[in-house]
Structures are given as C-alpha cells and as structure tokens.
Image (tube, rainbow, N blue to C red):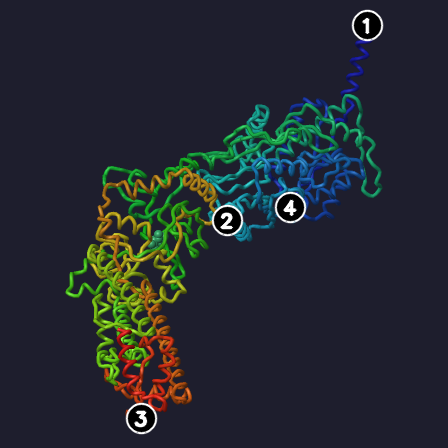
Amino acid sequence: MAVIVVLLLVWSTLASTALPPVIRIGAIFTEDQKDSSVELAFKYAVYKINKDRELFPNTTLVYDIQYVPRDDSFRTSKKVCRQMEFGVQAIFGPSDPILGAHIQSICEALDVPHLEARIDFEPLSKEFSINLHPSQEHMNKAFKDLMTFLNWTKVAIIYEEDYGLFKLQELVKAPAAARTEMYIRQAGPTSYRQVLREVRQKEIYKLIVDTNPRNIQKFFRAILQLQMNDYRYHYMFTTFDLETFDLEDFKYNSVNITAFRIVDVDHPKVKEILEVMEKFQPIGHAILNKSGIIQAEPALMYDSVYVFAKGLSDMNYNYSIKPMNLSCDVEKPWDDGLSLYNYLDSVRKLHSLTGNIEFNGGKRSNFKLDLLKLKKEEIRKVGQWTPAGGVNITDPNAFYESHAPNITLVVMTREERPYVMVKEEKNLTGNARYEGFCIDLLKCIAGQVGFQYSIRLVPDHMYGVYDPDTKEWNGIVRELMEKRADLAVASMTINYARESVIDFTKPFMNLGIGILFKVPTSQPTRLFSFMNPLAVEIWLYVLAAYMLVSFTLFVMARFSPYEWNNPHPCHQESDIVENQFSVSNSFWFITGTFLRQGSGLNPKATSTRIVGGIWWFFTLIIISSYTANLAAFLTVERMITPIESAQDLADQTDISYGTLEGGSTMTFFRDSKIGIYQKMWRFMESRKPPVFVKMYEEGVQRVLEGNYAFLMESTMLDYAVQRDCNLTQIGGLLDSKGYGIATPKGSPWRDKISLAILELQEKGVIQILYDKWWKNTGDVCNRDDKSKESKANALGVENIGGVFVVLLCGLALAILVAILEFCWNSKKNAQTDRQSLCSEMAEELRFAVRCHGSRQRPALRRSCTRCSPATTYVPAALDLPHINGDRLQGRLLSGGRHPAHDGHEEVADHLRRGHLAAT
Ligand code: ASP
C-alpha cells in the first residue's frame, strides 16, 4: 500500500511538471494600440496568472509583444515569423480583422494556437483559431431578433469601415421581416451629418450604427445638430461599449439608444475581477474605462490569456508539452500544437470578464449578450440575447416609453372664439387657462391616444401663410416646421400649400368661405309699391304685349272680310259697311279686357276672336299672378340687400370687403385662378385703409359698423350670426374644406390622432362638442325667423315668361287664320267676278290699306273709285242662308255685271237679312 502511495506521488509530481517552466507567448498589437488598455489588459492577465499560480504553479508565462502598422500585413507576417522562431506556444491578437486573417494563416501552417478577439466575418471555423469575440453570424442574428421584436420596417444602416457592409450583409440580405426596407450608407466623421440628414429626409427613424467608436462623439454631435434626438429615433449601436460613451446630451430627451454588451459588469465574478484590476496600480485605471467599466476589447484580451492558461493547465494533467522553435521558411508544424488547440477549444467552466467561456470549433458558444438601453438618467440592462434563446426582454416597458402617458407634447394654438379662449380668471396656470371646442377635442384625443400636452399660443398670432417675397412661412405653420411644437390644435384649415410643409390629420370639421354682412334694413313703404309684385321687365313686356295685340287686332279686323258689317241693318239699302275695330276701338277693347271690364265691342271673325281669346288668357294669368304676389308683398317685410353673392361684391366698390390676415382665407383669394376671386383680391390688396383684420372679432365689428362685408369661414360665420341678429350670411359658400390637427412632417402622432378623430366623429363626440360651443352657450340671439327668412320676390321673366310665349303663339295663329279668311274670301270673289285670284286679292288688299283710318267704308263697289257703282262688297261673315248663300254671294259679288239680275236690289236685300242674322 505504501509503495502505491509513493508511486502516485511520484507520478503526480512528474505530471505537474509536464509543463516546461517557461511558456512563451507572442502578442501582436497595432502601433496605435501601444500602451492601450488592450495591451495593458494582456500584460495584466499574464502578470496575474503568473502571480496567482493557481493554474500552473511551476510554470511562468513569458510574452513577446510586437507592434505592427495597421493594414501592413507583410511586416506583420514577418514579425509573427520571428516570434515563431523565438518559440512561442501561442499568438495573441491583433484585433484588426484583416491583419488577423494573415496571422491566422501562419498559425494554421505551423500548428500554433491563435487566440484572437476580433470580428470574424467568415461563418466557417478556422483551424488553430480561438476567437473570443462572438461570431458575426451570431451578432447579426442578435440584431435581427431585436429588429423583429421591435417591429422595425424601415431601417437605415450606417457603417464606417470598408468591411462594414460585408460584416452586416446578413442583415441586408434577409431583413427581419420580409417587408423591412433598408437604406444603407457608409459614413465617416466628415460625412456623418450629411448621411444623417439624408436619413431624416427619407423619414427613417430606426438606425443601426456601425461606426468607429473612436469617432462616436462626432457622430453624436451630428445627431444633436440635426435634432435627430427625439422619441421617434432609435439608434442601435453595434459596439459593445455603449456604457463607456458620454451620453449626457441624450438623457431626458426620449431618444432611443440601444446596444449589446458582452461584459456583464453587474455579475459578482466580473465585479470582483474588475475591482482587483482597478486596484492594481498604476495600470489598473488605464485598463478600465471608468470605475467598474471596461471596454470589450481589453476584456476579451484579458479573457483570451485566461483561456490559454486554462487550456494549458487542462492539458498539463494529461500531456507533456514540448516547446519548439518554429520557422516560417521550413514550415514544419509544432507537434503539440494540435493537442493544445484541442484543449483550448474544449475549455469549460471558465467564467471571466466576458461571461461563460465555451468554444465550438474555435468560436464562442453558449455566451450571453446583455441588451442595454438608455433610459432617462442612465443606461440600463433591459434584456439579454443568447444564441439558443434569442431576445429576452426583462423590462417590459423598455421600448414603449414613447407611447406611455408621460410623454408631453407641445401643442401650439391660437386664440379664436369658440375654438380656443383664454379664461378670465387670473389665478389659473398651465392648460387650465384655456377653454373652447379645440381644448375639449384635444382633451379627448390625448386621453385616447395617450399623451400629455402643454398648450402654447403662437407668438405672432397667425395661422400661417407663405410669403413669396421672403420665401418664409409664419404663424403656427412655421412653429411646426421648426419643430418648436409637436401638434397644432386650432381652427387650422387644411390646404395644399400647408400640406406640402407640414402634416395634417383627417379633418374634424368641414367648412367653406362665406360672406358675413349686416342684416339689410327694411324697405321703406313707397307710393308705387303696388308695382313691386312684377319685375320691371315684366311691366315693360306687358306694355309691349298690349301695344302689339291692340295693333294686331286692328290690322286683322281690317283684313278680315267678316269684320265689315252694315252699320244700319235696318237700312238694307245702305251700301256702307263698317269695321268696328278702328285703332282706338282696338286699344279700348284690349284695355277693357285687360282690366277685366267690358268694352262693348265683340270680335266676329275667327281670327280676331282668336286674338281676343288669347289676350283674355294672357290677362287672366298676369292678373292672377300679380294678385297672388301682391298679397305676399303686403305680408312680407321687404329687405334691401345691396349684395347677394360674391359676384355682386366683385362688381361694386362702394362696399369694401376683406379677410383675416395671415390665414387660409386670405391665401384662397391671393392664389386663386378664378377671375372673380382674382378681381376681389386686387380690390382687397389695394384698398386703403386696409381691409384685412388681425382677429375675427375685428372683422365682425367692422361689418356691424356698416358698409363692409367680411369673408370668413362658415363655422366662425355661423357662430357670429347665431349670436348677433344684426348679422347675416350672404349667398352660399365659395369653397369647401376642413380643419385638421397639424403636426410636423413625418410625425408619428398623425395616424394615431387621425384614428382618434374618426372614432370621436363616429361616436358623435365631435357633434356634441359642436353643439356645446355653438348652440348651448346661452348667448344665441332670437331671430324672428319668419320675417327675416321668408322673402317675396318680384315675379320675373323666369316665373311668368311662358304666358308671353302663349300670347305670341296665339297671335301667330290668329294671323294665319286671318290670312286664310282673306284668301278664301278673295277666291270666292274671284270666281264670281271672273277675275284672277291675284288681281282680286290685290284689289281687296289695296282697298283695305287705302281705307285706313276710317271705321266706315262704302260697301265695296267696284265703281266706288274705279269699279262700277252697282258693285257692292259683302263680307262672308254675314250669315246668309248657306245653301243660297254661296250662290247668292257669287252672284252678288258679280253684281250688276250679271245680265239677268238687277244686282243692286238683291244685294241690299241680302245685306239687310244677312246683317240681321249676324247680329
Ligand atoms: N382657419 C383659417 C386658417 O387656417 C383662418 C382663416 O383664414 O380664415 O388660416
């Protein structure tokens, strides 16, 4: 038994001395890393391992450090070869990914473990490489998981190093969600601002920033200069060193800044290591960035030395190691290299600065990244990421602060009745000072969307118009453009010009431009008021119709043979025929019937009867219309309205008119392409004293003073009209538009507020608010609606013009019938007279025309002037017995020329009888 114990002791002593007393290691640092925290961390780790003697009590680590120029792979390779000749058992560094790849190939050729802490783009594991830095594949997965968690759909990637794009290509190739839009730009200290400006213009608010940590302050400055530091922006930094940055300028302004860290400084083990390190003077302070915080690179370097030591000590139990001087020229690999590498790759149960250390094919596995986020006052851990579990958020509110009710938005507004009014009580402060429709609406929306607000009045008291001379906006629009406010809740009209520089929500109220005018005074009663029921032109047309019809009757009666009668029917022998429709009788007949009286005259011929009938119809309509409208005129109060529409305003210059200054109503006229509005604008612009007013109240006051029309928005107009019975709206609305809540361009609040407005509209809340502020305020004036609203208008051509048409048609018919009568009679006479129809007609016509002016004419004797004395004219209208009539008439008309008869007696006899029958 004692022999066995002695043997074991001897074996264990032999085993523990399997490591040579000195193990050489080589380290490569770039020249700019000389005396840097990375180099110091390396030296400190070696010192610590040698001093503690926990891992290998009898062996000392000896290092050889070489500095190489960055990007000089030739010199770097030469230096590494020299270290190999010197007999190093491992190479550490450098952190530069390009140089690292060169050294890797030398180590691979000579079977020397290469311990590095650099970003590795290649997904495949490389022989003899132990990389403490999490692989880029894992990093990209972590970023993608976070983007998916945060639901990013539009992302900008800003990278600095040339290999940045290569590094992040996985993010670009397979975006977190298929619909993620990526905007990728390379930027350096000189172009940070320009690139960020482009990002802002593209309205991208989520950024992945892969810039050089050394230039981070310049990047931060660009963010501040461009004011890209509000709650909308989210910067995800790829660096592990967020805690080491000065984020003082970003605290309290709600900007989202996140990053992963690999050193969990809150872990007790890590805390302990850092404490010891910090106490190690004079280099402790130089390794640590600030008390208790270390950058990732020195931490990874520190850990890589420990990994080497742990692997070596693990190997030490089973394997004796024989150091060897190697040469790049001979290329003979180190025999123990592979074994050592395998021990390093299978290091377990090592918890150091970068957490649990395990490898798989030389790459970190089973590690953890903490997710950090800048909160109000400090950076806090809000979750973690592991290759197996993905993102795990431990602070559920971490990313939703912008939606939380403690966001306070600056709401710009303008005093305007009844939208925003300042309360009269003096001791009120904050939002409590204001009341009105918009204030109530804002309260509802804020409650629904979830924000707090602070109301401010716009300094220049304008809604906002673009001044083409200065090329600048003013009023609320400018405040929003310059981001001095988050919202504008006022009676802000949505129009094209404004929408191109700021955003508007869906409209919460619809309106148009109307004309406010003073209620017209009652018309004084006039002596000739009886004329009012008919328009002047109707009176003139009636007069013209009277003349025309009278004259037509006269002419027609002269031509119609049936209007010529024997004036003395008892004296049958009389050869005189008479026409009752002389000029004066015609006028008298028409006058009498027009005034619904008799005239003692009766037309006998069909044509004249048609004239009479149609005239009676005409008078019936005119007199009934006149009577009906006169009744309306006598019961309705007449108003004098000098203007009825915008056209009336434009056509005159006596009444001046204007709009609110610096508002959309003004720009409506200024920018209009419609002739009448352009004319109105020229008038308004040139008018002295100015017709523009600063406040709506001022405009209303000017209207009340008289001789002024105020062009204002219908909502405000309704409010004014409902409250003052001396005001009225003239005509209809000139346009149609809406009020919306304005936000700066790209504001995330717009859509949410639009939704809230639609909901409030559908629930009827906006209508309730309207009624509250417009109707139920108790100061609404009582208008005698009947007398003001009902108006009797003079009847014009459009109302009774038809009756004139009927009259003209009747007259035309009568003329036609008269011509037929004339022709028919002439034809008959021509047969009897055995004359040609033409000559008979010409004779009759001449007779009718020649005997003008006399009521009587001798019965047509062909001898009267030119015809034989025995010939007598007998009108066919005499109702001679029909059977004989024609025959007789024919004979009569042939008169004395018929040899068989004494025509004279017979005609007189028939005339007598005929006339009697007719009368
Ligand atoms: N509400 C209008 C505006 O937004 C004011 C006006 O011009 O009548 O400008």
Q: Nearer the viewer, residue 6 or 275?
A: 275
- N-terminal of the two: label 1 or label 2? 1
Q: Nearer the viewer, mark 3 or mark 2?
A: 3
Q: Label 3 vs label 2: CA separation? A: 126 Å
Label 3 packing within 10 angstroms: few (<14), some (14-19), many (20+) = some
- Whether residues under marks 4 and 1 lie with C-beta atoms below 8 angstroms apart, the answer is no
Q: Quarter of the image containing the N terminus?
A: top right
Looking at the picture, does residue 801 appear above or below residue 10? below
Residue bearing the label numbered 4: 164
326 left or right of 243 in image: right
Q: Which residue is mark 2?
A: 222
> Does residue 562 appear anywhere in the picture?
yes
- Mark 4 to mark 2: distance in Å? 20 Å
The residue sitting at the top extreme is 1
Q: Earlier in the sequence, mark 1 or mark 3?
A: 1
Image point (72%, 23%), residue name: 58
Give coordinates of residue 264: x percent, y percent: 58, 29
Q: Position of residue 94 (x, y in %)?
A: 68, 40
The alpha-carbon separation of the residues under discs 1 and 3 comes to 191 Å
Name the amino acid type tagged 3: Ser
Kindly report the distance in space between the C-alpha atoms of the residues bearing marks 1 and 2: 78 Å
Q: Mark 3: is the Cβ under 8 angstroms from ligand 1? A: no
Residue at the disc numbered 1: 1
Q: Is residue 881 above or below residue 364?
A: below
